[in-house]
Image (cartoon, rainbow, N blue to C red):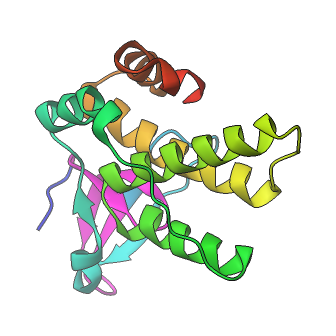
């Protein structure tokens, strides 16, 4: 069970702070999403607690950034863009922070490859990249007690390829 004040990763909302735990009308966490323009307190049932996960520790976050260059891009493809989008969005929502970083790296590469051919990348690529970046940078920022922009700078310092992370 998580305690008030802890940070967790909600599958749909991303990083949230546990604001309260209530029993009425049903046992639930009161979660406040972090880093959103207009966050709203959400209620999340305790019985679904297994779908929440704790954020990375400071050490895990730093290790993830330091090992960025070693993270392999995901070469998953499917017969349609919609199925590919579903696959990658599931990784972002249900996976770890490392999964989100891998998805962001994958789509940065795919976008660069398309642009190298003087073509415009598919909108779905941009959408997946943005979602993966937002999810990973917000979790890493909370773990390192900094801003997502500062985390993007840390990525660029360890791997120049990550310069477009923000």
- Decide if residue 83 is on the left or right side of residue 17: right
Residue 70 can be seen in this image = yes
Residue, x 43% and y 39% (percent of image)? 138
Quarter where residue 155 is shown: top left
Magenta residue check for 14? yes
Q: Which residue is depicted at the point 88% across and 37% down?
A: 118
128 over 133 or under it: above or below: below
* Quarter containing the N terminus: bottom left
Q: Residue at x 28, y 68 (%)?
A: 52
Q: Is residue 42 left or right of residue 123?
A: left
* Residue 41 percent across, percent down from the top left: 48, 58
On screen, residue 71 versus residue 160, left or right, reads left
Residue 93 appears in which quarter of the rendering?
bottom left
Residue 149 showing in the rendered view:
no
Within the magenta stretch, is there residue 100? Answer: no
Residue 148: x and y in percent read 46, 27
What residue appears at the point 70 percent right and 54 percent down from the top-left corner? 125
Q: Position of residue 80 (x, y in %)?
A: 72, 80
Location of the C terminus (image quadrant) = top right
Tally the marks.
0
161 shown above or below 70: above
Q: Give the magenta-colored segment's residue range.
A: 5-30
Query: Magenta region, mostly helix, strand or loop?
Result: strand
């Amino acid at each position: 069970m998580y305690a008030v004040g802890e940070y967790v990763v909600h599958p749909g909302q991303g990083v949230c702070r546990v604001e309260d735990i209530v029993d009425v009308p049903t046992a639930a966490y009161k979660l406040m999403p972090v880093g959103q323009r207009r966050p709203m307190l959400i209620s999340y049932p305790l019985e679904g607690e297994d779908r929440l996960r704790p954020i990375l520790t400071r050490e895990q976050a730093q290790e993830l950034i330091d090992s960025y260059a070693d993270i392999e891009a995901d070469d998953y493809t499917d017969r349609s863009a919609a199925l590919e989008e579903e696959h990658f969005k599931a990784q972002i929502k249900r996976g770890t922070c490392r999964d989100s970083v891998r998805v962001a790296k994958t789509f940065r590469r795919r976008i660069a490859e398309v642009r190298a051919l003087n073509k415009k990348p598919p909108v779905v690529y941009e959408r997946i990249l943005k979602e993966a970046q937002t999810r990973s940078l917000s979790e890493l920022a909370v773990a390192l007690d900094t801003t997502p922009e500062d985390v993007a700078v840390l990525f660029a310092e360890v791997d120049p390829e990550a310069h477009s992370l923000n």
